[in-house]
Image (cartoon, coloured by chain):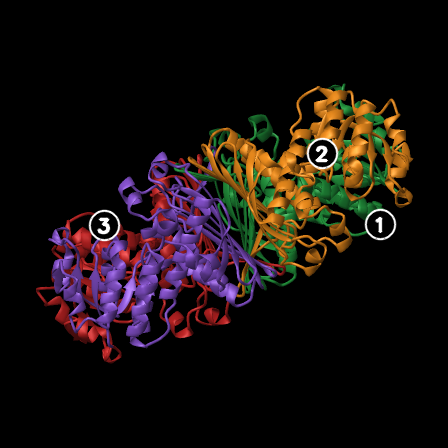
Chain colours: A purple, B orange, C green, D red
Amino acid sequence: MKKVTVGIIGAGRIGQLHADNILGSQLYNLKALSDIQVEHLKGTHYENLVPVITTNPQDIFTDPEIDAVFICSSTDTHAEYIKAAARAGKHIFCEKPISFNIEETRKALEVVKEAGVKFQVGFNRRYDKHFRKVRETVQAGVIGTPHVIKVCSRDPEAPPEAYVQRSGGMFIDMTIHDFDMVRYLSGSNVTEVSVAAANLVDPMFGVNGDIDTAIITLKFENGALAVIDNSRQAVYGYDQRIEVFGDKGVVSAENETQTNIRISTKESIASDHPKYFFLDRYKDAYVEEINDFAKAILEDGPLVCTGEDGYQAELLAVAARVSWKEARTVSLAELSSVPV
Amino acid sequence: MKKVTVGIIGAGRIGQLHADNILGSQLYNLKALSDIQVEHLKGTHYENLVPVITTNPQDIFTDPEIDAVFICSSTDTHAEYIKAAARAGKHIFCEKPISFNIEETRKALEVVKEAGVKFQVGFNRRYDKHFRKVRETVQAGVIGTPHVIKVCSRDPEAPPEAYVQRSGGMFIDMTIHDFDMVRYLSGSNVTEVSVAAANLVDPMFGVNGDIDTAIITLKFENGALAVIDNSRQAVYGYDQRIEVFGDKGVVSAENETQTNIRISTKESIASDHPKYFFLDRYKDAYVEEINDFAKAILEDGPLVCTGEDGYQAELLAVAARVSWKEARTVSLAELSSVPV
Amino acid sequence: MKKVTVGIIGAGRIGQLHADNILGSQLYNLKALSDIQVEHLKGTHYENLVPVITTNPQDIFTDPEIDAVFICSSTDTHAEYIKAAARAGKHIFCEKPISFNIEETRKALEVVKEAGVKFQVGFNRRYDKHFRKVRETVQAGVIGTPHVIKVCSRDPEAPPEAYVQRSGGMFIDMTIHDFDMVRYLSGSNVTEVSVAAANLVDPMFGVNGDIDTAIITLKFENGALAVIDNSRQAVYGYDQRIEVFGDKGVVSAENETQTNIRISTKESIASDHPKYFFLDRYKDAYVEEINDFAKAILEDGPLVCTGEDGYQAELLAVAARVSWKEARTVSLAELSSVPV
Amino acid sequence: MKKVTVGIIGAGRIGQLHADNILGSQLYNLKALSDIQVEHLKGTHYENLVPVITTNPQDIFTDPEIDAVFICSSTDTHAEYIKAAARAGKHIFCEKPISFNIEETRKALEVVKEAGVKFQVGFNRRYDKHFRKVRETVQAGVIGTPHVIKVCSRDPEAPPEAYVQRSGGMFIDMTIHDFDMVRYLSGSNVTEVSVAAANLVDPMFGVNGDIDTAIITLKFENGALAVIDNSRQAVYGYDQRIEVFGDKGVVSAENETQTNIRISTKESIASDHPKYFFLDRYKDAYVEEINDFAKAILEDGPLVCTGEDGYQAELLAVAARVSWKEARTVSLAELSSVPV
């Protein structure tokens, strides 16, 4: 069977996650790994298993054996690498968000389009088996026409301040997954965004011009409404629930728990905690998304998660930021003129 | 044991519900029942069990044996009857909403205050055992400081058009319970209301200038946020869920189901439906609320659900209406000058 | 509407429970209450509400106004009162077990048959809405032919020693409800009983020749199997679950909890405890069973829970006792010759 | 890191399952695969990845590079291969049951003991994360002293007749996992076994001298009781639940479902089915068990699942068979003299 030969740019947490999944997949060869520094890879299994380890991403772009590039570096470098990879004729898997600047994202995607390469953005939750089945249920018409979509998305603990400072803000860093999820579930585009946000978890967020708690209401072209509620800290574990309500019923997905055990004593009736964070909860989804990308390349098939999806989610993050800053409902129509 | 002797004004569905609960309670004597017409009571058990059945509510206000009046007539008559009852020195239990006009409500409550009588508004959900335990859990500090309160409130089926036309609109007719619930759960007052509303269930609502679907976001004085989502029609049954999320955890109440059975076959894994509507779901709460009212009278104790609570919930309904009509966030501070 | 006029024999816990339900029912008049001593009824609401309070049950048997007798006295007196009531032409509601002696039970039921009066035994769990719906599901063929019936039945705490000493043993005191439940669910008679029993909860049971923990396996005429597991002490609350498994699926009923709330914190994910004991869990079932008895009398209709049902459950308790004592499987066929 | 070099005997369904997990593990090299015929491996990935594919298991026993042998051939060959592997100084992982004959098993284990090699039997359910956490909870004393252990174990569909004919009967083929589970959970040995069994699913079982439905009651040395209920066919999916009840509480593990979604419509409230069968439900457990075996070899540590565990479970299967055939309770003490 033909395999996809891959180079990965960025060997941090998410880059290594993809590297390990690629190494474990029958659909891929992992040829190269690049990072701005590679000392932390010394003595790891990557030394044995990856032929090229480099600090120069050009080694990847110029390698004729490499079919596809995974861009897992810091967000501010994405646009540049996307354009370089596309011009080199490589298929591209890019982590979210595509960039911090909606114009930059648009330009990078134009280069991708011209090059005619495949481009997938890393909205891994589309590959979560629970969420996927919710979408399939909606698309099968089981709950009728969607009226209200609800996404509850809470991280188990706040990231460190250094992370917050270069995250681009909660909307583009964290909520972007939820923006994509409501689009994925609704099958419609958003027309309006309205935000109520607060700094309740840790003053550090406010000090850095960010918020940590939000309720985001959206309207869709097809008339449906959606609401996302976010918090940077759910002390009981990663809280990831969705619900689509329609004129024939409602479909929802509950949290995955660590085990299905229940302990009943005089003191309490206790079940197990949700899986603690995204590496645990979305472990299988990360595998699915890269295998799906490989199949799209090998069979020249369609992508589940396109550059357009990445762009639209970014637009929503921008709209949410404006809504929060200006304390008003923001129409997506006005965003073309907003400096981002 | 001393009992509270009662006259009920209004012998429709809710009036009869209270009448039956009063007849079944050891804390009450039901002395009189009045309605604008009383033919429908002919041949019922009320004829045997209620000494006075009348079309004239004055018969209740002037009866020296009667300690308390239950006002269960149509909303547009509430204010007048409240004032008459208060001036007659009767304690008052009034169904929600107090009136359709916030100024009228204020004036009626001023008369109540002058008269020094007890006044309870019929927010029966405060007596639901699940919701009450959620509140107790919050107040005990178990989930820490509340950050986000969520109320999902969906009726099983849309009311008839004639009802919609005199309902005052969804916010004051249906959402008013949810407005009270977020106040009950948060223990704080609202500062801002923002609404996304739609007419998705039945065009009839739109024809009558009303909506049937809404997401309502609220901010509280203490910094917390809340979101209510409403629909006039959940085909699977009455959907009544709440959640309070804080810095130490989250507490929620799920729907009550008709039974706890589960049927697993090749085709499906099925559990039972939620109880179908408020008469079923809140059956016990209706009993609790009148017994609590009687105890407050007999022991001269405090009320769980005051005129002020009724007034504040009405204010929120007004704010929601303005937010919807003017497509903007409404500050509660501005409402004193809003003609309602 | 015609009502059933009732006399109750025995004014202990269960007698008062029935008295209160009868007082609250539109289908009954409570005419008389008898007990071997009546001092404990002084100053209670019964003094006002029950015309005759007596230490002589003959006052009930001889009262021509009384239609039906509720026998709630100690088990050793049941047979005598059943016969007296039947001969006086009164319909009979008798608490479980009918007697401690299977021959005595048979003879009492013969007198009932001759007298042609209605006779209902107090297997209240047949009126639990969850269990009833399980039975209806089975009877509707939804799970096909039943193969295995499972009943888990555990009391929240052990009864006092004095109670144990006159209880007749766990099988006839406690398991008798479960014996009836498997018959109710299977719609078939038992052919064999096999018991594994132990004294694990409290040595007091063993000292009194009793056990507190058991697993009881049964075979039915229709080929199905059943298993009951009992404990006298489940510290987390009353544990009452059933399951019927067949060739097309399985139907089960879970415990009723005190509320539907869930509390998630760093330490635990906690839901609420089961309702604590039978007075709470089967509160509605006790009301249903007496109303059903009244209807059977007023409409001369069939009974859900007959003398035969009481007799068969007692037979199973006897068989279980023999199986335990003789450490062998007991065939129901051999029981006619067993001295009990 | 040092790895364990492995040869696998038997390349059927379970042999291939272990082969794939071994290939995916960092702890193993897969050197050889043997089967009585190897045509079915032509063109598979094993051709590329496994150096030796052979019809002669001696090639494995005599290969000095091979550290451990996985015995996945038909049960009637296990004892012979165990002895050969042990004498060759190979560590042994053997699928369940060790053999169909308890004496043969004992003799094979004696050879293992003399050889001083590691021996693990494939009771994969000990590695299921839910069941393991139940055991850990019991061992931590959370539910106090165990009184009653319950195992519900039902296959989703009956195996084909050819399988049944060489399965050794339900007790040694299927229930053996449950016998091990009750030992694993109780931490005590069984003293008595009593069986109620039936042929309800398909007459084919009866024709072949087997049963398809059973309730098995066990007594333990420490006084606890256990009950296993089995069926060869649960049409709603693989039903695998356990419960340990003690004097301080109860701990249970529910089924794993395919997804956590719930669909509520007018017709039904539906959740997802259990995972369909053991390859899906115990997928992770199969990985865990081989990694644990490798660690025990590499670190010369203790085994979770020993030859003794395999032997004891077989003894229980024999006792169950005798109990069923002779319709009586069987004491484990008498089994030494039973010809098996």
Q: Position of residue D248 (x, y in %)?
A: 44, 34
* The quarter of the displayed image where residue C340 is located: top right
Q: For residue D109, what is the image quadrant?
A: bottom left
**Callout 3: chain:** D
- Mark 2: amino acid: Glu
C244 and D273: which is toward the camera: D273
Disc 1 to disc 3, how far (Cα)?
Answer: 70 Å
Judging by the rendered image, the residue that carries numbered circle 3 is D303
Q: Residue at x 16, y 53 (%)?
A: D297
Q: CA distance from mark 3 to mark 2?
A: 78 Å
Q: Which residue is mark 1?
A: C299
Dots 1, 3 in contact, CB < 8 A? no
Return the residue nearer the eye: D14 or C118: D14
Query: On screen, A340 above or below D277?
Result: above
* Residue furthest to the left: D64
**Is D74 positioned to the left or the right of C244 in the image?**
left
* Label 3: which secondary element: loop
* Vertical comparison of C85 with B162: above or below: above
Percent coordinates x, y for residue B305 in the rendering: 66, 30
As drawn, is B232 to the left or to the right of A82? right
Q: Position of residue D193 (x, y in %)?
A: 42, 51
